[in-house]
């Protein structure tokens, strides 16, 4: 089943928005829940974003350099 993967809440230190630094997982690659799938940054810190579920990355919807916030769709995955 295809589902939209949203950026999870990363904590109060991140503020409202983060910038996508890079993806650890590429399209058509499988990953496990808890595995780091991307890195994001603020002007104060860098954070790895773990997968909230296991699956296969079908489409990346935000690119490196894009600014996103919790709840934004970052990818389409197949579970």
Image: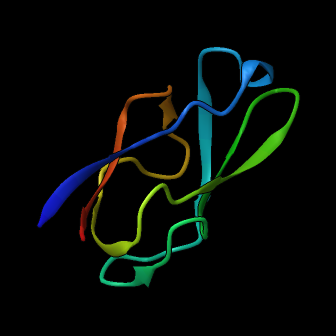
Residue lying farthest to the right in this orientation: 44
In the displayed structure, 68 sits above or below 1; it is: above
In the displayed structure, 10 sits above or below 63; it is: above
Q: Residue at x 46, y 78 (%)?
A: 31
Q: Residue at x 75, y 46 (%)?
A: 47
18 displayed left or right of 79: right
Among the 4 quarters of the image, the one containing residue 6: top left
63 displayed left or right of 15: left
Q: Quadrant of the C terminus?
A: bottom left
Toward the viewer: 53 or 49? Answer: 53
In the displayed structure, 5 sits above or below 35; it is: above
Q: Residue at x 61, y 36 (%)?
A: 19
Q: Quadrant of the N terminus?
A: bottom left
Toward the viewer: 63 or 77? Answer: 77
Instruction: Estimate the x, y position of residue 58 in percent, counting from the top left.
Output: 24, 71
Instruction: Estimate the x, y position of residue 73 in percent, counting from the top left.
Output: 32, 40
Number of numbered discs: 0
4 displayed left or right of 47: left
Instruction: Estimate the x, y position of residue 25 in percent, counting from the top left.
Output: 50, 74
Instruction: Estimate the x, y position of residue 57 in percent, counting from the top left.
Output: 32, 72
Among the 4 quarters of the image, the one containing residue 65: top right
Q: Residue at x 86, y 36 (%)?
A: 45
């Amino acid at each position: 089943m295809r589902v939209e993967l949203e950026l999870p809440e990363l904590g109060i230190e991140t503020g409202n928005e983060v910038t996508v630094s890079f993806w650890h997982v590429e399209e058509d690659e499988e990953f496990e829940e808890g595995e780091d799938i991307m890195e994001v940054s603020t002007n104060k810190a860098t954070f790895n974003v773990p997968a909230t579920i296991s699956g296969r990355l079908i489409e990346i919807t935000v690119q490196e350099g894009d600014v996103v916030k919790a709840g934004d769709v970052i990818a389409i995955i197949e579970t």
